[in-house]
Amino acid sequence: MSTYTGACLCRGITFTLSGDPQAVFVCYCTDCSLNAGGPFQITARFPSPSLQLHDPENLKTVYTVTSGTVSGHPKEKHFCGRCGCTLFTVPLKHDREIVVMRTAVIEGGLERFRPQAELFCKRRPGYLRPCEGTEEWEEMPVAK
């Protein structure tokens, strides 16, 4: 079984992920753009039990997005209260069974986890090209 490690920007929160992601995607939705401070985020979906969080200083903070979500369901943004780095999202639509990890916070994640799909492509800025070999979705596909 694969094991991956990562941390927030200040290294106050670290984590271990067991197993490979269920899916890896680029998302251009408004929430991802705002959260990334750029046009998109690259994320990897894992089953919640895959994540082992190490937070000895109790730095993890949660912000719940309650309105305007694409799914119509709330989602939690888990981030470091010291450096502000978002680590993962928990879409409550899935009863906390899924964590959506930012691939950039996983050690080597941007190289290891190649996106399989791009979501909300209608919001992709005209100066960006599609990721080679990915499926393109105008909206969010139904989660498996």
Image: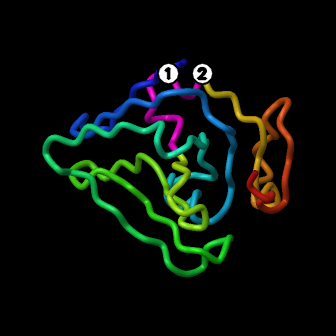
Element type at marker 2?
helix
Element type at marker 1?
loop
Q: On the rendered structure, is 65 left or right of 114? A: left
Vertical position of residue 2 compared to residue 142: above or below: above
Q: Residue at x 54, y 63 (%)?
A: 95
**How far is mark 1 from mark 2, CA to CA?**
6 Å
Read off the residue under disc 1: 108
Asked whether the viewer can see residue 48, the reply is yes
Looking at the picture, the colour scheme in use is: rainbow
What range is drawn magenta here? Answer: 101-112
Q: Residue at x 79, y 59 (%)?
A: 142
Q: Amino acid at mark 1?
A: Gly
The residue at the far bottom in this view is 67
Read off the residue under disc 2: 112
Q: Position of residue 44 (x, y in %)?
A: 60, 40
Vertical position of residue 23 compared to residue 28: above or below: above
Q: On the rendered structure, is 21 left or right of 62? A: right
Q: On the rendered structure, is 99 left or right of 26? A: left
Q: Amino acid at mark 2?
A: Arg
Q: On the rendered structure, is 127 left or right of 53? A: right
Return the mark for residue 14. none
Q: Are marks 1 and 2 in contact (CB under 8 Å)?
A: yes
12, 33: nearer the viewer: 12
Q: Position of residue 127 (x, y in %)?
A: 77, 47
34, 1: nearer the viewer: 1
Q: Residues within 10 Å of mark 2 (few under 14, many from 20)?
A: few
